[in-house]
Image (spheres, rainbow, N blue to C red):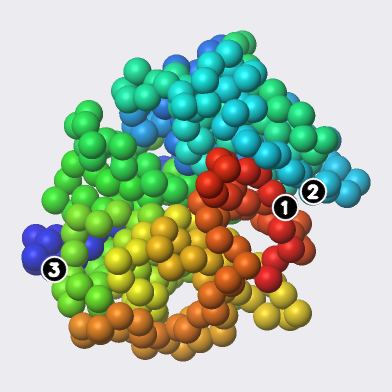
């Protein structure tokens, strides 16, 4: 491990291996109990089975599974449009829009209802809130009083402060596990952990991954994954992860085992001086694409065909190399997104008039 530390970006994949049989046989709601989740913040979101919403609590360094009771499948998912989302959230919370910060967005795949995580207020004393936007555009606060929930602590989180805010940068639920990206307080600080659901109190092991950052011309250990998806390449699940400035890395999920040292493959450098914000994978006219929104390089549409055969970037590049992309000029100001159905996505757009929720056709 120490030899890797000189030049590796460490992503820790945590697996709770001792409870695999229990996790596979248990109902998704088996670990939930009635009460009030002690959320200290509401950050990244992801949906699991049976209307269960996973909420990343960066301040508390924990993942919460909350039963939204939003399970009835929609016959047809409806497009959602909300102008001045922050203002409308402020109205239902009884505050000013300047005191509302929207952190993430996710769509319930069963119902098409949209959920956003919110901070009411600023700084460490901000109050965490989850807001649901129903298919008819009606907003309501998701009550956290007397709900069914479960909690999993995130191990070895950074101490309270700026780094703690990046203890969880993204979430995904895939094949019975909650994948979580963020920073730890360890030497290999950038990591990805996977926690089987239902949650358990069993111990957690980890595997370190080495990647090369082409635009910086070096291996790194401190930069966290900003956003990721799980995608099947040659019928095997892979993690496709994007970092600041903007390497795109693939890692076979099967290689991420306790105690293993795995080299991720940098399959693209998508442009420096940029921060990826969110990404999804979708199919259009029989081809798969990554759709990634960014802080300074707009919306990228990236074909996935070359992801499996890409050999990897292992030397410094000036700006862009590897998988190419198309910039979707019509989609500007997108800060968050999630897929609504096979043809559409729900996006949060920031423009001069504020923050708007909109349904778009996938490009």
Mark 3 is surrounded, within 10 Å at the Cα level, by few (under 14), some (14 to 19) or many (20 or more) other residues, namely some
Q: Nearer the viewer, residue 92 or 144?
A: 92
According to the picture, the residue beneath numbered tag 1 turns out to be 359
Among the 4 quarters of the image, the one containing residue 156:
top left
Residue pictured at 53% horizontal, 66% vertical: 299
According to the picture, the residue beneath numbered tag 3 turns out to be 7
Q: Nearer the viewer, residue 340 or 253?
A: 340
Number of marks in the rendered image: 3
328 versus 96 height, above or below: below
Q: Tag 3's secondary structure?
A: loop
Residue 18 place in picture, x, y as percent: 41, 43
Residue 115 place in picture, x, y as percent: 63, 36
The Cα atoms of the two marked residues, 3 and 1, are separated by 42 Å
Q: Tag 1's secondary structure?
A: strand
The Cα atoms of the two marked residues, 2 and 3, are separated by 46 Å
Q: Are marks 2 and 1 in contact (CB under 8 Å)?
A: yes
Residue 29 shows in the view: no
Which label sits on residue 79? Answer: 2
Residue 242 place in picture, x, y as percent: 40, 64
């Amino acid at each position: 491990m120490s030899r890797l530390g000189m030049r590796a970006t460490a992503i820790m994949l945590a697996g709770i291996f001792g409870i695999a049989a229990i996790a596979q046989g248990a109902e998704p709601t088996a670990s939930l109990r009635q009460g009030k989740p002690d959320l200290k913040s509401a950050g990244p979101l992801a949906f699991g089975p049976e209307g269960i919403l996973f909420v990343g609590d960066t301040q508390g360094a924990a993942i919460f599974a909350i039963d939204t009771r939003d399970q009835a499948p929609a016959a047809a998912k409806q497009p959602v449009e909300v102008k001045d989302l922050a203002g409308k959230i402020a109205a239902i919370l009884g505050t000013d829009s300047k005191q509302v910060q929207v952190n993430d967005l996710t769509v319930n795949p069963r119902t098409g209802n949209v959920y956003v995580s919110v901070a009411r207020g600023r700084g460490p004393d901000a109050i965490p809130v989850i807001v649901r936007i129903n298919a008819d555009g009606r907003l309501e606060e998701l009550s956290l009083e007397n709900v069914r929930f479960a909690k999993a602590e995130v191990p070895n989180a950074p101490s309270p402060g700026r780094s703690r805010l990046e203890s969880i940068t993204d979430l995904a639920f895939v094949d019975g596990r909650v994948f979580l990206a963020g920073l730890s307080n360890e030497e290999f600080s950038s990591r990805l952990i996977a926690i089987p659901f239902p949650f358990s109190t069993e111990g957690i092991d980890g595997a370190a991954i080495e990647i090369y950052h082409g635009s910086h011309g070096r291996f790194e250990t401190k930069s966290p994954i900003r956003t990721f998806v799980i995608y099947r390449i040659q019928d095997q699940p892979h993690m496709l992860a994007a970092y600041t400035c903007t390497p795109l890395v693939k890692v076979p999920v099967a290689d991420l085992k306790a105690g293993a040292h795995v080299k991720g493959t940098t399959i693209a450098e998508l442009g420096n001086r940029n921060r990826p914000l969110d990404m999804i994978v979708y199919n259009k006219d029989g081809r798969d694409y990554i759709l990634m929104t960014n802080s300074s390089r707009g919306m990228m549409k990236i074909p996935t065909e070359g992801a499996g055969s890409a050999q990897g970037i292992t030397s410094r590049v000036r700006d862009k190399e590897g998988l190419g992309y198309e910039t979707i000029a019509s989609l500007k100001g997108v800060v968050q997104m999630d897929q609504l159905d096979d043809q559409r996505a729900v996006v949060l757009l920031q423009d001069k008039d504020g923050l708007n929720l909109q349904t778009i056709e996938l490009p």
